[in-house]
Amino acid sequence: MTALDELAVAVTGKALNYLRDTGEDIENYPVSIVDFVIEYAIRECHIPKHYSDKDKARLFSNYVYVLAMMCNDIYMKVGAEGETSHSEGNTSRHYESAWISKSLISSLPNFVNTPSTIEV
């Protein structure tokens, strides 16, 4: 198992626990969401090119809770793609964004304009 696979397992477990704590009845978490969020985070954080997958996994292991909440942010919007609010039956939801919430994205490190010699 690669370091990024281990990160995905940790994120999946945390996301699943968060959902179960809210009363969501879910057995298996959609792996595609977790993979997407990890790839998105790696791209959006502008990680220096010399970082190996192991370095990236070690860096993001400090942000498992944020990645898990990003996964749940997407999961909870299934069926409401592109909307910032959604009503169904007697339930209404309002989202900060139609995409991953900006407050979650801003919680991740950003390497823009930083020296490429940063240690992980």
Image (cartoon, rainbow, N blue to C red):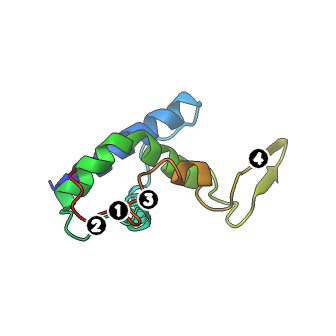
The residue type indicated by label 4 comes to: Arg
Counting residues from the N terminus, which is met first, the one under dot 2 or under dot 4? 2
Element carrying mark 1: loop
**Crowdedness near tag 2: few (<14), some (14–19) or many (≥20) residues, C-alpha within 10 Å:** some
Counting residues from the N terminus, which is met first, the one under dot 1 or under dot 3? 3
Residues at circles 2 and 4 in contact by the CB criterion of under 8 Å: no
Counting residues from the N terminus, which is met first, the one under dot 2 or under dot 1? 2
Circle on res. 48: 2
Separation of marks 2 and 4 at Cα, in angstroms: 38 Å
Question: Which tag is nearer the camera, tag 3 or tag 2?
Answer: 2
Question: Which tag is nearer the camera, tag 2 or tag 1?
Answer: 1
Counting residues from the N terminus, which is met first, the one under dot 3 or under dot 4? 3
Numbered circles on residues, count: 4
Element carrying mark 2: loop
Residue tagged by mark 3? 37
Circle on res. 76: none
**Crowdedness near tag 3: few (<14), some (14–19) or many (≥20) residues, C-alpha within 10 Å:** many
Question: Which tag is nearer the camera, tag 3 or tag 4?
Answer: 3
Separation of marks 3 and 2 at Cα, in angstroms: 18 Å
Residues at circles 2 and 1 in contact by the CB criterion of under 8 Å: yes
**Crowdedness near tag 4: few (<14), some (14–19) or many (≥20) residues, C-alpha within 10 Å:** few
**Crowdedness near tag 1: few (<14), some (14–19) or many (≥20) residues, C-alpha within 10 Å:** few
Separation of marks 1 and 4 at Cα, in angstroms: 38 Å
Is 117 placed left or right of 84 in the picture?
Answer: left
The percent coordinates of residue 10 (x first, y second) are 31, 42
- Relative to 41, say whether 50 is above or below: below
Separation of marks 1 and 3 at Cα, in angstroms: 23 Å
The residue type indicated by label 2 comes to: Pro
Separation of marks 3 and 4 at Cα, in angstroms: 22 Å
The percent coordinates of residue 52 (x first, y second) are 18, 63
The residue type indicated by label 3 comes to: Val
Residue tagged by mark 1? 114
